[in-house]
Amino acid sequence: MRAVTLPGLPMSPDPHLLSPLRIAGVTLPNRMVMGAMHTRLETLDRPLQRLAAFYATRAAGEIALILTGGYSPVPEGVMDEGGLVLDSADQLDEHRQITSAVREAGGRIVLQILHAGRYAKLADCVAPSPGKARINVHAPRALSTAEVWATIESFAHTASLAEQAGYAGVEIMGSEGYLINEFTAALTNRRNDEFGGDFERRIRFPLEIVRAVRARVGRDFMLIYRISSIDLMEGGMTGPEVAAFARRIEQAGADMINTGVGWHESAVPTIAASVPRAAWLAAVRNVKQAVSIPVMASNRINTPDVAERIIASGAADLVSMARPLLADPEFAKKVRLGRSDEINLCIACNQACLDHIFTERTASCLVNPRAGREIEFDDRAAAGSKRIAVVGGGPAGMAFALESARRGHRVSLFEAQDELGGQLILARKVPGKFEFDGMLRYFDRALRLAEVDLRLGTMASAVELADGGFDEIVLATGVLPRIPALEGVDHPKVVGYQDVLSGRVMVGDRVAILGAGGIGFDVAEFLLGNAEESLDPNAFMTAWGVDASLSAPGGLAPPAPHHPRRQVHMFQRKRESLGRSLGKSTGWILKAKLRKARVAMTAGASYHAVDDRGLHYSVDGERRVLDVDTVVLCTGQEPNRGLHAELERRGVAARLIGGAHVASELDAKRAIDEATRLAVTI
Ligand code: NAP
Ligand code: SF4
């Protein structure tokens, strides 16, 4: 493949990523695609304005192609009540607002057609056969043969409407366990008409859809099919079946194949941070080797170098990135300009994107609070430049300092430690959280580029702040661990989570963790020590039971047993099951890992004392002693406001943000959001 040299720039380190590609009647300027992602922006006021701004911002950032969130071709195929449908010419004007905004920004946008099948959160949802999905409360009704033909026609109708609305093409969503995928898998298709039974009849539904769409749209209109490259479900396709199916999709008239991984109800994680980067390449390559049309890789691709390596390896022709484009709309532009080190990295946390969607909120991004809220932020420079002191280099302090400096203020950031990061320095030690490293690198680089005066290793004093000539003082001094009132809390067996994660203390083989919030679970994961599972694809496949040879149905194999390094016992005082507060899209992964490592969990505990015998506690009035070597306190946090009190005493005004403002339920998402919103007002 040809290396690209850009005028005035040295040879690009990402030549494959930057080479153009012609598909149908469209020439894509590079190989980076924004994958489809449901945003729920349609549930807010001014939905069209929001969607148009959301997509146009990414187009201006030079992404080659944008795939919309899924639009159903029929009302019963929407994700939930009020979900997106495109089934009438009356809607064309609305869609033209989106397509023209993207075109004006220099981009191209493709409409994804998604029928949710038995995943639709609707009482009248439909499927190939009866049988409720594990993740839905509603049981589907089986479509009649005539209804299947009508559904095929509805896909063609929606594709035709998309063409009239100015989209560059359509993507037919055939993966992730939605309706089409339910037809192709024996597990969910037990029909005995022309759409069920053997492999040929199970793949007929998608093939008829592709043929019907091809017949209805122009040759230059892009037809993308998203195939399930590995179902990760019992009764799913084998690798050879996926390859044979991909060939048939090409013959039916598709211009390009995108690759999906797993179903939403699979017991194997597919996109969380605990999945190694580019973990699913073998499944993508299996598709690529079967066809001659371009193939797109997806899932856990968040940096230009990973994307470049995938294309250079020949496993795929393009990369689809959805979450990384929430994190940084200028991803592709920065790659073109050779400024990849300025990309705001998606850390695969799911906290503001998928976790929001799954809990009926709109998608945004932990590292970029503007995502999905483009029309809410005023990004003009500040009216006048102020001198601002920011104390604390954790997420809140870094985000505030960066935003303020970008608006034209002269900012000094004081951090007592020798490095930036605050609580993130500890978080990145947790297996599966190594992506936090990228976030810290981004802030470090961005703060220096914004010419923030970084005072690392400097404990700011009230005198210095008061006499420093600052117009504004912002305190992001973070949190202090909460020490519970417990007899023996100063016993040598008792340690804090910060001591454990920083490696300052030795932890024994038998451990009790008090407190089961996000940090309690992180500490349990850390103590069990499975770091390689989230870094090495082979270790991940072995641990989670994925058949790397792709020969078994659904790509599944028996998972390897886990031999934990320690005996861990987690406690909380609440009576509810442990882990309720964890993120919807990631909590189940963590809980599954801890179950496998036989971590004991006790709810409704009262703690009495720690002594040489161990932890004394009771449940339902019954007193017990747990013989442990170490008791780790993960019992929440309190705001660190010592400096604020001193400034108040001197009559100096200061604003509090992040954990120093409100410690309870503080996470990086709230810290960055709060800091960014305050910064744009000063
Ligand atoms: P947290 O989620 O508030 O949990 C604190 C735990 O301590 C709770 O289990 C609480 O449960 C217990 N506790 C509170 N006061 C106590 C007391 N006086 N004595 C004994 N136990 C007490 O806080 P965290 O775990 O420290 O986490 C801080 C923030 O970071 C949270 O918002 C969390 O969501 C976030 N975080 C998120 C992630 C993530 O993966 N998304 C990871 C780490 C941290 P009982 O009162 O029932 O005992
Ligand atoms: Fe990525 Fe987290 Fe932002 Fe989602 S919220 S896009 S996973 S950084």
Image: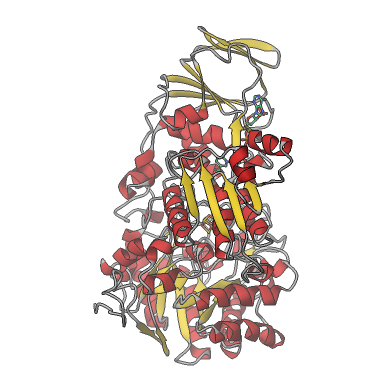
Q: Quadrant of the N terminus?
A: bottom left
Image point (33%, 69%), residue name: 316
Instruction: Give the image location of residue 446, x and y in percent.
Output: 46, 59
Front residue of this view, candidates 356 and 384 = 384
* 559 lies left or right of 591: left
Q: Tell how many labels.
A: 0
Measured along the vertical axis of the image, is residue 82 above or below residue 26?
above
Image point (52%, 79%), residue name: 110
Q: Can residue 316 be seen in this view?
A: yes
Q: In which quarter of the image is residue 673?
A: bottom right
Q: In which quarter of the image is the C terminus?
A: bottom right
Instruction: Give the image location of residue 300, x and y in percent.
Output: 42, 57
Front residue of this view, candidates 572 and 611 = 611
How was the colour assigned to the protein in this rendering? secondary structure
Image point (35%, 53%), residue name: 552
Measured along the vertical axis of the image, is residue 635 above or below residue 156?
above
Image point (33%, 60%), residue name: 281
Q: Can residue 598 be seen in this view?
A: no
Instruction: Give the image location of residue 665, x and y in percent.
Output: 65, 41
* 593 lies left or right of 602: left
* 290 lies left or right of 446: left
Find the residue positioned furthest to the top. 612
Q: In which quarter of the image is residue 376?
A: bottom right
Front residue of this view, candidates 6 and 401 = 401
Measured along the vertical axis of the image, is residue 157 above or below residue 419?
below
Instruction: Give the image location of residue 143, x and y in percent.
Output: 62, 68
